[in-house]
Image: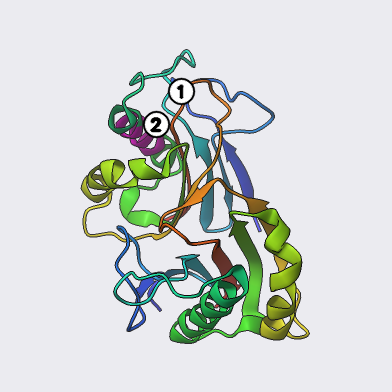
Amino acid sequence: MTRREEIRVPGRPELSHSADAVRADDLVFVAGILPVDADGRLVGEDAVEQARFVLDELGRILRGAGCSPADVVKVCVYLTDVHDRPSINPLRQAFFGAARPASTLVEVSGLAVPGAKVEIDAVAAA
Amino acid sequence: MSRQEYHVEGLAEPISHFTDAVRAGGLVYVSGIVAVDGDGNLVGGADVVAQTVQVFENMRAVLGAAGCGFEDVVKVTVFLTDIDDRPRINPVRQEVFGATRPASTLVEVPRLAVDGAKVEIECVALVP
């Protein structure tokens, strides 16, 4: 088994010098996911729509790495307005189901794409 | 699982209760690095590109101490005080990582721990 494998999922934007995820031995590190489509255009008007898209993308990337949401061990959520936390929580519950990853959530002053309100990265067990 | 702390000779003393990197099993977790010299003085002035070059020089030393190079990095997290600096530092990242593409997160934060620092970068690497 290759110890380090860069994972790319079709339809993902090319925002910086990054893979969508990298597997390292038995862990998968998922890059920060922004609410943008394959052409780098913002998706979603508000934090809820954006978070729904980001979690869908997280699911796609995890599948691309042979994982599922239940395999996530750590998630980090970056919000431009920490008050959006309660409104996106139901989406997280729906995404992870019975699984409860370790989680960090912070407010940041800006994200790489103007208008983006949420970015999520994660570590999963391969 | 084994745990080993790395403190690199010649780099500034960590400004808080942490060390330069910690290895856990086959992975090395590198602390957030800002553009300081061995005495802890900011390098690069207000030039975010010069700061980023210094950050990666320090990172090279930390990774090297753990037996790693940039090609072993699996995740990188970049904290900028001005998100508009992202295009400016991207060429530095491309030069440093070359064909390697770590998973990456980049966010803007209001301030960093060292006065004048415009960029901080942490990473996780796989020990070859």
Same chain? Circles 2 and 1: yes
Q: Which mark is residue B11?
A: 1
What's the amino acid at mark 1?
Leu
Mark 2: secondary structure: helix
Is A36 in front, or is A62? A36
**CA gap, disc 2 and disc 1:** 7 Å
Residue bearing the label numbered 2 = B58
Chain identity of mark 1: B
Dominant secondary structure, magenta: helix
The quadrant where residue A120 appears = bottom right
What's the amino acid at mark 2?
Asn
Q: Marks 1 and 2: in contact by CB < 8 Å?
A: yes
> Does B98 appear above or below B31?
below
Task: Specify which label sits upstream in the sequence, 2 or 1.
Answer: 1
Chain identity of mark 2: B
Q: Range of the magenta residues?
A: B52-61
Image coordinates for residue B44, horizontal then vertical, percent: 33, 21
